[in-house]
Image: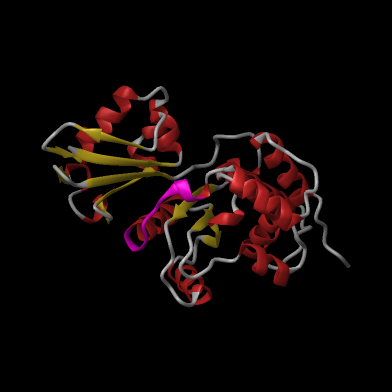
Amino acid sequence: MIKIRLLGGAKKAVGRSSLDFDRKQASVSEILTFLQGISQEPRLLQAGNLIIAVNGVDSQALSGPDTMAKEGDTVTIVTVVHGGMEDNRLSLWNVLVAGVYKLDDKDTGKLLDRLRAENPKVMVQAADAAAVYGRDHALGALDIVLEAMARNIMIANRPETEVLLRLACTDQIAEALKRARLREGEAGCFIAFSTDAQALKKFGEQISHEFTLDDSVILQSREKRKALAKTVGISQEVDDDKEFLDLLLERAAILIRKN
């Protein structure tokens, strides 16, 4: 068996986060063809929009689509979201949202500085996974940021900082860091965006090599909902995930710059 892990749009396309491919060995191309055959939305599984890693190594650094996976290997497939897919500010950008299982770096600030320096065409932010109420929370907050940037009404000086403020539902940077900063030894979430599709894909390949990507760490849950409600001051009882997400994004959207 070859284990296949699916993140982001790839997970949505197949309808599950993982599955086993009953082959002793198979090329990346064959695995992708297999997934497209069982997918309800094969358009989400176009090779040019995917980062495919075999045992944590980007297949593009090996033999590309001819890279072989063998029995016992793990193939991880991550979708890079390109512009033009939605009728909002996100449609003008290429976006990557990726959960990460446990950060071992002692200085997460230096980690972010390094990743930004190594990827100058990509805007990179990372947050504590506990502060992200699902992928749609990250994308919704980013959409608010891009709208604020386009209208020149951002609270922060940098879009990356604005992302953290909107996720944390506060206009104070110190409070945003307290609520949502990336923490050593904890799960995290990278939010990266760029107008350069290839630059973003390169960043995605880099983090897939350096970290263990795992979107399960940003999934919605009752425990996370209760913790976030307390953190951002949502007093009413909300049991519906969509309703709670709407409340978070509403609070993110009403933040304004103070003169």
Q: Give whichever of 205, 11 is nearer the camera.
A: 11
Residue drawn at x 67%, y 34% as measured from the top left: 240
Q: Nearer the viewer, residue 250 or 225?
A: 225
Residue 142 on the magenta segment: no
Outermost residue, left direction?
Answer: 24
In x, y percent, where is residue 81? Answer: 48, 43
The residues colored magenta run 209-217
Q: Image quadrant of residue 179?
A: bottom right
**Total tally of numbered discs in the picture:** 0
**134 lies above or below 117:** above
User: What colouring method underlies this structural image?
Assistant: secondary structure
Which residue: 47% across, 51% down? Answer: 98
Vertical order, 226 against 9 (above or below): below
- Quadrant location, the N terminus: top left
Q: Position of residue 112 (x, y in %)?
A: 50, 70
Q: Is residue 59 left or right of residue 95?
A: left
Q: Nearer the viewer, residue 224 or 31?
A: 224
Residue 214 falls inside the magenta stretch: yes
Residue at far right of view: 259
For residue 82, side relative to residue 142 (left or right): left
Q: How far across and how far down the image is residue 77, in percent? A: 34, 43
Quarter of the image where the C terminus is located:
bottom right
Task: Name the residue rendered at 25%, 29% in the picture.
Answer: 33
| Front residue of this view, candidates 196 and 116 | 116
| Left or right of 201 in this view: 123 | right
In the rendered image, residue 43, in percent from the top left (x then y), is placed at 41, 28
**Which residue is pictured at 74% across the width and 51% down the height?**
252
* Picture layout, residue 41 above or below residue 97: above
